[in-house]
Image: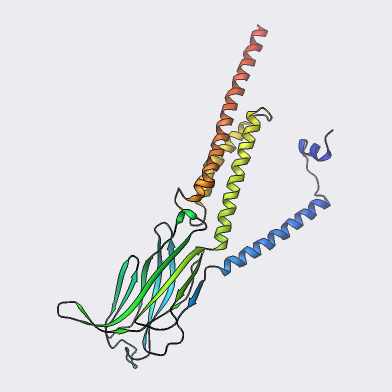
Amino acid sequence: MLSDRQMRLLNPAPRRLSGRGWLYSGVALVLFAIVAVVVGAIYLSEGGVTITGGLQPPNNSGVIAEVRPMAMDPVTNTASVRLVFTEFGNRYISTGSGVLTRTVRISVSTTDGVQEFIYPAGSHLGQAQVMLGTYGEVWLYPFDRYEANFTVAAEQVQRQPDATWRVQSSIPVGMQTQGGLPGWDISGTMPTGMAASASGDLAYSRAFTTKLFAILMLAMMALLSITVLAVALLTFSGRRRLEVALMSWMGAILFALPVLRSSLPNAPPIGAGIDILIFMWVLVFAIIAMLLMAVTWIRVRRLQLLASSTQDDDFT
């Protein structure tokens, strides 16, 4: 004998929400609000830079390079940072106008080469955008990590008649950092003092909310494909009636899965670890389900035609 709940499933009808239903709904709403607030707070606290070291109050004249992360491209293994150069002390600038009294050349050395920036006498130190080569593996998404190192050096130079630069003296350099990058947690080390050249290291790892979003999306895609396959198996084995609408539903899901995959934050290129370990099987299950439904429809349609033909023969 069927229970009341089973009977309601077989014969649905409008009815008022019970006291237990109100309780479950309230508890679910409160839990969702708590989780949303916690995740939102974590998201707002992410994207900063945690640096070990960094320039302490300098005690001599020199150039201070402030490092501001701008972008991270895991596909090309490059990171973009903005370096803001300021002069500390009055050895290289005019105390009245604040402009350089000598021509300064600043060199930034990275794994991709050396970039030079010239600031002539009579101008101000400015800022420069630098591309850093990084070391990392995008196929580990969303647990990939990238590291970059760079060196900043400053020199007082003089233009020669043959258009070359003659180095007159080195200028002490110090490093500081500021800002952050949404979606990434950045850590690193920088020198605490000023020297002829200053070297810094930066490490980029994906923020917790990015990892959480990617994992949940992959889990939902896997659950969806398993559900589709289960429905197809039940229909194929004759345990459930074939519904044409199911085929449309499965076809829509099959085309929606790649869209969901591309909606992952900073989605990696095809062939990453998530494709080999999860997404490929998600697609395989969905395709198998679609094929099973097609075979079932062919079988059922054939039996319907045979039954109709038999009835016509009996009638004649």
At 33% from the left and 65% from the top, the residue drawn is 112
Residue 22 appears left or right of 280: right
Answer whether residue 32 is visible to the viewer in this image. yes
The N terminus: image quadrant: top right
In the image shown, does 35 or 109 lie closer to the viewer? 109
Residue 22 appears left or right of 310: right
Q: Position of residue 165 (x, y in %)?
A: 21, 79
> Where 91 sits versus 232, above or below?
below
Q: State the image quarter where residue 58 is shown.
A: bottom left
> Where 233 sits versus 102, above or below?
above
Q: State the image quarter where residue 201 is shown.
A: bottom left
The C terminus: image quadrant: top right
Residue located farthest toward the bottom when viewing the structure as drawn = 96
At 50% from the left and 46% from the top, the residue drawn is 276
Q: Position of residue 32 (x, y in %)?
A: 69, 58
Q: Position of residue 159 (x, y in %)?
A: 20, 81
Answer whether residue 267 is visible to the viewer in this image. no
In the image shown, does 192 or 216 lie closer to the viewer? 192
At 42% from the left and 56% from the top, the residue drawn is 75
In the image shown, does 294 or 192 lie closer to the viewer? 192
Q: Position of residue 227 (x, y in %)?
A: 63, 40
> Where 27 sits versus 220, above or below?
below
